[in-house]
Amino acid sequence: MDALYAKPDFSDEDGVKAAELGGDYEEMGGWMAESDAGTLLSNLGVKEDKHFVLMKDLDTKDKVRVLLAQALFGNPDVLILDEPTNDLDVETISWLEDFLANYEETVIVVSHDRHFLDAVCTDVADIDFAKINIYSGNYSFWYEASQLSQRQRAQQNKKAEDKKKELEEFIARFSSNVAKAKQATARKKMIDKLNIEKMPHSSRRYPAIIFEQEREAGDQILEIENMSASNEEGVLFKDLNLNLKKGDKVAVLSRNSQATTAFFQILE
C-alpha cells in the first residue's frame, strides 16, 4: 500500500486498490499484528525490553520462547508443537495450557508433561505395537483405556490357553481309545478354532535412574539458614531458610531458572 500512495501519479484506480488492500489487511489482523506479537511474547515470559532485540543477541531460554510465540502467532490452521513446555516456568505453562485449551484450530502436540496433556488434549494418538490408535479424551483417559484394553486381551488369551490345555489333556488321554476317538477328533478341531492372540511386545521403554543408598538416612535431611546467591545481573535469592526432614517432598520453583540452578549448585 505504501508503494501505491507514494506514486506521483496516484489515481482513483490506485485509491480503490489501496482501499481493497487495506480491507484485506484489516481482516488479517494486520493493524494489530505488532501489538498481538508483543502480547504473545510477554505472556511467554519475554520481557518488553527484549522485544526488539535480535535473535542472535538473546539467551537460549528467550530464543525458545520467541520461537514458540512465532508458532502461535497468527492463529495457524494447524499448530504442531514438540515439547512446548521445555524451559518454561509454571506460570507460562499455565498460560499456554489456557491458550491451547481455548484454541479453535487443530493442535498436534508431543509432550512428556502429563498434566499439560490432560489440560490441553481432547484426543490421544497412541503409537505402539507398530500401529496408531486414536483415543477420545485426555492423557489420563487414554492411560486407563489402554491399560484396560491390554488386561482384557491378556484375560481372553488366558481363557483360550486354559481351554486349549484342557482339550489337549483330553486328546492325550483318549486318542487311542476307540470309543472316545470321535470326541478326541472333535476336540482337535476345537483347538484349531481357538483364537490365541500372540501378545506383541510394546515398543515403549521406561528408563529410570535408581540410587542405591550406602546407609539409611537420619530424620534430619537438610537444614539451610540465610542462604543467598547472586550473579552479574543481581540477587538471585536472599536469606533462604529451609528445614527438610525424612519423608518431605519439596518442589523448587522460581520465575528465574538461574536462581534454581544456583540453589542446586550450592547444595552440591
Image (spheres, rainbow, N blue to C red):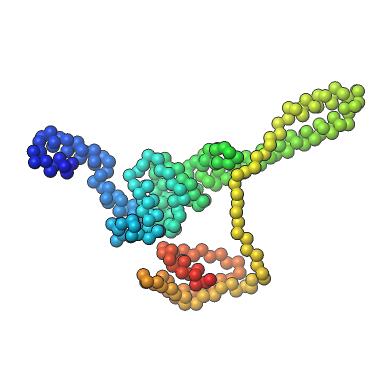
Relative image position of residue 60 (x, y in whole percent) = 40, 58
Instruction: Determine whether 198 is above or below 216 in the image.
Output: above
Instruction: Determine whether 136 is above or below 88 in the image.
Output: above
Relative image position of residue 148 (x, y in whole percent) = 62, 42
- Res 120 visible: no
On the picture, is 17 further left or further right than 206? left
Instruction: Determine whether 176 is above or below 4 in the image.
Output: above
* Residue 104: quarter of image: top left
Relative image position of residue 262 (x, y in whole percent) = 46, 69
* Residue 64: quarter of image: bottom left
Please report the residue visible at 80 percent of the width from the left and 27 percent of the height from the top.
188
Looking at the picture, tell me which residue is in the foreground, 129 or 74: 129
Residue farthest to the front, as pictured: 56
Relative image position of residue 257 (x, y in whole percent) = 43, 63
- Res 199 visible: yes
Please report the residue visible at 28 percent of the width from the left and 57 percent of the height from the top.
52
On the picture, is 182 further left or further right than 27? right
Q: How many marks?
A: 0
Please report the residue visible at 84 percent of the width from the left and 33 percent of the height from the top.
169
Residue farthest to the bottom, as pictured: 226
* Residue 1: quarter of image: top left
Looking at the picture, tell me which residue is in the foreground, 241 or 36: 36
Please report the residue visible at 62 percent of the width from the left and 40 percent of the height from the top.
149
